[in-house]
Image (tube, rainbow, N blue to C red):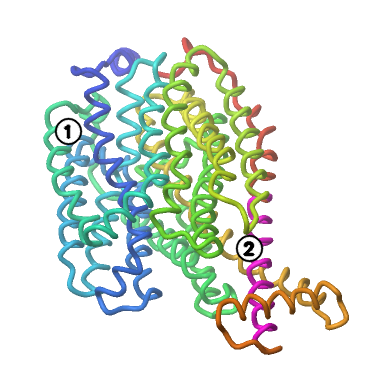
Amino acid sequence: MENQNLSYDAWRPSHSPWLIALAVMLPTFMEILDTAVANVALPHIAGNLSATTHEATWALTSYLISNAVILPATAWFSGFFGRKRFLMVCVVIFTLSSALCGFAGSLGFLIFARVLQGAGGGGLQPISQAILLESFPKERRGMAMAVFALGAIIAPIIGPVIGGWITDNFSWRWIFFINIPIGVISVFLAQKFIEDPPYIQKRSLLHLDYIGFSLMAVGLGALQLVLDKGQEVDWFAADWVVWTSVLVVAALSAFVFWELRVKEPVVNLRILKDGNFHTGVFLITVLGFVLYGTTVLLPLFLQTLMGYNALHSGLALSPRGIFSFMMAAVVGKLVSRVDGRYIVACGLVVLGVACYQLGNINLAMGPEYIFLPVIFSGMAISAIFIPLTTLAMATLERSEMGNATGLYNLMRNIGGSVGISMAATFLARMSQVHQNALVSHLTPYDPAYQEAMRRGAQVLAQAGGVVSPDAALGFIYRETVRQASLLAFIDNFHWFGLLCLACVPSVWLFKRVRQGNMAH
């Protein structure tokens, strides 16, 4: 058995790690990008398919649910079918379902195609991450994670820009059709350069853990549904949210209990006993929370309060992606020379300060005022993600990488879903709180109120509108709502910043791992 483990540890792929990186990251980048670009095209999809925007959001939700179900089970499917074969099947399913999405003539058919697309895309992230970690030598795993960061971090950031441009200049259908040639090239590259390591080739799984997979599918699907739709129905004020939440707790609790007892679990939860890994899972969940939360908030602020369109708001945020890309190459080399804990801690501090600085927004600023915090947040995300992944996986065996990357990516996505839901909820609730506080100062005896009434009348007169006390009062109310929304955005950014800073001490829960002592 010892000789067998040594042969596994000594295994090296036949092709260059960089060719393997190209083969796995092309479809992964496509999958992550496609998730982001669909958000921008939602109003166009709704109008073209004769649906409301609210109904069209099911095209997003259905994808996320099926994606979440497949993510943690990727290691099991890789072992059952073979990792290379499973990767190629995932790419084929994703590509064909993308074509179906593009040809969809009704919302129902689009939702069906998106379910298939999410199932195909769910395995791509953990498979690519596991293959990269195994293909690069242990001393270059930081560079491997820098390559993965290009897809996992940058794609969600540039997605709205690409989606806005394609939708405005062509059609929303082309955000799906563009995946077809990329998918064909990806299958060819995977067939030529990727190979299964010995512990995948010799693994024998005779049956599917039907109970575990069913409990996981129900629990994660219901959780994603609650997170995505809860704010729209005021959370627990809706009976279905209450009962669905009960289902989430029951299904996931039963799933954990079952997986810890069954001989061949669909998800091996026992690897969470590893100190570095469970610390990394916690921090990647927080990073997903902040990354996806701020990625939603900034475009929302620019479009709803500043009057930007989707393309221009995406361009205003493009420095984050550019500098994240530049920083990834630097950090990838730095990880092999500097204790990763210091890099992660510095990244969390910089990200926290950048988020807090975004709280300096106002309604009279130009886009240049957010460039600096956006740039530093992009650099910080790469500085966190790359060494964090390296530290989290450092003490695991190679044979555990597939299972670990599935859990790791799942928790990043769940963190992102929670971040988006909480940001939307907090924004709505705090807007009401600030609006009530501001309205309490609007009295006819307040000199500021009297001045605002005069200014409102002047603005209406200059615009050629009806000048009356009621019209001026309406002008003041609209301005009050805008100011209340602004204050809510500021609160959100401040809380994101404080959360990052609060996580800094947890970095020292990682064991210091020298490159030479990393698990193979």
Q: Amino acid at mark 1?
A: Ala
The quarter of the picture where the N terminus appears is top left
Q: In screen coordinates, is 222 left or right of 485?
A: left
Residue at 26%, 21% in the rendered image: 18
- Secondary-structure class at tag 1: helix
Q: Which residue is pictured at 67% across the width and 51% down the height?
A: 495
The crowding category of the residue bearing disc 1, from other C-alpha atoms within 10 Å (few below 14, some 14 to 19, many at least 20), is many
Q: Marks 1 and 2, Cα distance to the nearest angstrom?
A: 44 Å
Give the residues drawn in magenta, as a range: 471-494
Q: What's the residue type where badge 2 is placed?
A: Phe
Rate crowding at label 2 as few (under 14), some (14 to 19) or many (20 or more) other CA atoms within 10 Å. Answer: some
Of residues 439 and 262, which is closer to you in this image?
A: 439
In the image, 42: left or right of 142?
Answer: left
Which residue does the image show at 32% across and 40% down from the upper left? 75
Residue picked out by circle 2? 426
Q: Is residue 247 magenta?
A: no
Question: Which secondary structure is most common in the magenta stretch?
Answer: helix
Say which of 441 and 285 sits in front.
441
Residue 360 on image: x %, y % = 67, 49
Q: Is residue 35 visible?
A: yes
Q: Position of residue 466 (x, y in %)?
A: 60, 88
Asked whether 170 or 259 is in front, the reply is: 170
Q: Which residue is mark 1?
A: 190
The residue depicted at 67 percent of the width and 66 percent of the height is 483
Q: In which quadrant of the rendered view does residue 188 lie?
A: top left
